[in-house]
Structures are given as structure tokens and as C-alpha cells.
Image: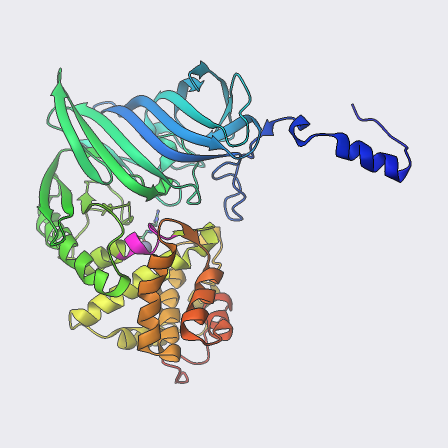
Amino acid sequence: MRHRLIVPGAVAASLLLAIPASAAEPSPGAPGVGDPYYPDYGNGGYDVSHYDLRLKYQPENDKLEGTATLLTTATQDLSRFNLDFALDVSEVRVNGKKAEFATSGAHELEITPAKPLKKGERATVVVRYAGTPSKVKVNGFTSWHRTKDGGVAANEPEAAWWWFPSNDHPTDKASYDVSVAVPDGTQAISNGTLQSQRSTAGWTRYNWRSRAPQATYLALLAVGKFDITKSETDSGLPVINAYSKDLGENDGAARASVERTGEITEWLEGYFGKYPFEALGGVVPNTDTSYALETQTRPFYSPGFKNGANTSLVAHELAHQWYGDSVSVRQWKDIWINEGFASYAQWLWSEDQGEGTAQELADYTYASYPADDEFWQVKPGDPGAENQFHDAVYDRGAMALQALRNKIGDKDFFAILKGWPQERGGGDATVKEFIAYAEKVSGEKLGKLFDTWLFTPGKPATGPTGKSAK
Ligand code: ARG
Ligand code: ZN
């Protein structure tokens, strides 16, 4: 009910002042963080600091079940809040007490705690669930890729919905413990380090830990029959790689690529600074996918290494560990701060391998797209949700960096490549913030250059060398 009060101004003001702030009713958290491309991804009203996932997966029938425990802190007085999730939930507890829950839309789980949460209050949220992730479609697709001997969660930006409830946006990063039981003889792979594994009553449980802040889409679960290789980098970090035993004739090329993870990471450290995480590796399951994903510490690779080794792809996914994983996008439209740099790292790798310099490849790429190609219509700095992974974000995105390098010179350019992850690692950032950082380091005005390369449709009149197009 609403009252209409007609009172003199001064009296009205004193009435307002008399209402203490705490009298405000707790309200529901927003169903999204307000990302312009994906308004209902992530949620408002709380932050997650840690995910503990204790799961069991049966490859025979693709059944995933278990319990997720989220350590959260309310960021407002909260009567209700959402998680993003697509599997079936059987019970939710908040601070030990049963909570009411309901589903809404394709991937929202609405939780009403028995008692509202106060701003700043920490809450332990336990969600018990089960499902057949390959059968659960959201907008017609699933990011769970079932294989002959298991399954893999890998996609961007939607991957978590099919295996754990989360605040599904890169702005809410957390640490992870992922414990998965699978039938003896099958392996479960996740991020970070393998703390232990133990077999009981026909099931082997793998306990993985990823300590550094990690975005939800970069959490990895791959189950299957794998050959696992273990080694150490010179600095003593564990390198754990996993190859499906079902890679067939691609097995050699997959290993000839991913076994070079330690070496390529150390080479990247020369450009980007110290590797930001506690472990590294790669996983190559026998999925029918064709993309790779920079899952944190342990990228996912599709099995189709049909042209022999692809170390350029490995360099791309490992570059993301700094650019994308350690420094995340603030909003999905900031995707250039991931893909532009990972693509540029491939040109640096090519140069190192004697297969063409970054300058040569930038010039070649610029020349290879005719001015009337729709390629030039996509703005890498704000490509639109439907073009988030368009070639323009990668290729024009990398050309933008070569143009920057030619404008400010190698010394400042490489200082920026190394300084940015140092300055922003563990958090998130925007394209605009990167531009401001580049201006600060170089002391140059760069607005026009970035406008041309990232935000203006059409082929720039001069190429990344600064010379005019022929
Ligand atoms: N970040 C990934 C990469 O560049 C791209 C993932 C694209 N996702 C997809 N479903 N095709 O390696
Ligand atoms: Zn990429």
C-alpha cells in the first residue's frame, strides 16, 4: 500500500531522516549482473569466494550427480537470490537450513533462504543435484560433450550450467575444489593440481584444487579413459596432460602439440611475465568438437589434429592464461582483451619458429581481406554477442596490436604486454582500461588508433605498418 503524504517541506525532510537505513526491506538479488550481451548471466546480491564440488559421474548412462557447496557473501540485504544452473536440483540449504527453491527461465535457480541474509553476511549454500547433462538443452544446445568413454564440459561463455550451479559471470571469480568419482579405470580431469586419488568399491575419486581466482566458464571437467603424463617446469610447477586413449591416428600430433606446454609457457613468460597459476597442462578428450578453450591451468583441445602438430594453437590457449584467465573480461563485449592478445601471441610464436614475423603476418592478414569483405564490418572492440568469436576479433584484433607496436615502438609495446597482467592479474578489465593503460605507459594519445582498429567498421585506410593500402 502506498500513502500520499502532503506535508510542508521541512517536515517531509525530517520524516525522511527519521527512517533508519536498516528499515529497508531485504530484496531479491538481480537475476543477472547486467552484461549487455547476456543480461541474465551471473546474478546480483552476492559474491562467491569458493566452490566445492563433490560429484559422481557414470559414463554408461551419462549421469552426473552430487553436491555443490558455495561460500558466498551477500552484497545487499537479500531476501532471495539466483544461481545459474540447468540440471535438476533436489535440495538447497543456506547456512545449514533448508531453503525454498524454484527454477525460472532456462538456467535460473531461485533460492529463498529461511532467513534473509544481511549485507556482508557470509552464507554457505549447499545444492544437491543430478542430471544427464548431454540431454539438457538450453536454447537448443548443450555444452556437455558426451564421448565414447565419458564427457566434457567446455564452451564459452556457457559451460557451467551443465555441471555445477554458479554465479556465472567472469566478474565473480573464485577458488575451486573439484572432487569427482568415476568407475575404476576411468579418469576425471579438472583444473590445477591433483591433490589425491583413491579407489573405493569400484569407484575412483579424483580430488583437484585450483587456488587462483577462476571464472566459471574456465572451470574444467573431463571424464574418460585418458593417458596422463606428468612432468615439471624448470621452476617446479607440475605439468599434467591428459590424452584420450581413443585419439586414433591423431594421437601422435596431439601429443607433439600439448607435450610442449611447459616449454611454450616458459617462452611466453618472456613476453607476459611470470606464469600466473600453480600448475599447467592440457586435456585432449575424444569429443566431436572443433574448438579449443583456455580452461584455467589446463586448456581443452579438440582431438582433430589432422595436419600434424599445432603448437600455434597451444601458444594461443596458453597466452590466454594471462590474457583471459588471469585478467578476465569485465563484460563479454571486452572479448578483444582475450582473443586479440592470444592471437598476437601466435604471431610471436611464428616469428620465434622462423615461420614469418608478426609484422609479415599482420601485413599479410590485412591484405588478404578485401575491403568489401564482411570481415571488416565487425568491430573487435564491441563485436556483438553473435560475433563474439568472429575472425575479426582474432585477426583484426591482432592487427590492432601490431598497429600499436608500430606507433609506440617495441620498448613500450613489450612493456605493456608484460605490465598489464602484472597490474590487473586476478581480476577483470575493459578494453577502455587497456587503452588507458597503453596511453599511460607510452605517454601517447592512442584514442584514434584504437578507434580505427577496434571500433570503426570498414577496412582501415592504412595497414598495421602505418603504410597505405595498395
Ligand atoms: N576462447 C576460445 C579460443 O579462442 C574460443 C571458444 C569459442 N567457443 C565456441 N563454442 N566455438 O580458444
Ligand atoms: Zn582464444
Name the residue nearer the viewer: 432 or 143: 432
Asked whether, in this view, residue 461 is left or right of residue 134, the answer is right
Ligand 2 positioned in quadrant: bottom left
What residue is shown at x 27% (from left), y 44% (from top)?
Answer: 289
Q: Is residue 346 above or below residue 40?
A: below
For the image, the number of numbered tags is 0
Asked whether, in this view, residue 297 is left or right of residue 127, the answer is left
What residue is shown at x 45% (from left), y 56% (from top)?
Answer: 334
Point out the stretch of residues depicted in magenta.
319-327
Name the residue nearer the viewer: 361 or 374: 361
Query: Which quadrant holds the C terminus?
Result: bottom left
Q: Is residue 147 visible?
A: no
Query: Which quadrant holds the N terminus?
Result: top right
> Where in the figure is residue 451, as x and y percent of width and height?
50, 70
In this picture the colour scheme is rainbow
322 in magenta: yes
Q: Is residue 89 above or below residue 405?
A: above
Asked whether, in this view, residue 120 is left or right of residue 412, the answer is right
> Where in the figure is residue 282, as x and y percent of width and height?
19, 46
Q: Is residue 411 above or below residue 287?
A: below
Name the residue nearer the viewer: 219 or 145: 219
> Where in the figure is residue 296, as x and y percent of width and height?
28, 45
Name the residue nearer the viewer: 75 or 14: 14
91 in magenta: no
Q: Quadrant of residue 421?
A: bottom left
Q: Is residue 109 visible?
A: yes
> Where in the figure is residue 170, as x and y percent of width and height?
41, 45
Q: Quadrant of residue 54?
A: top left
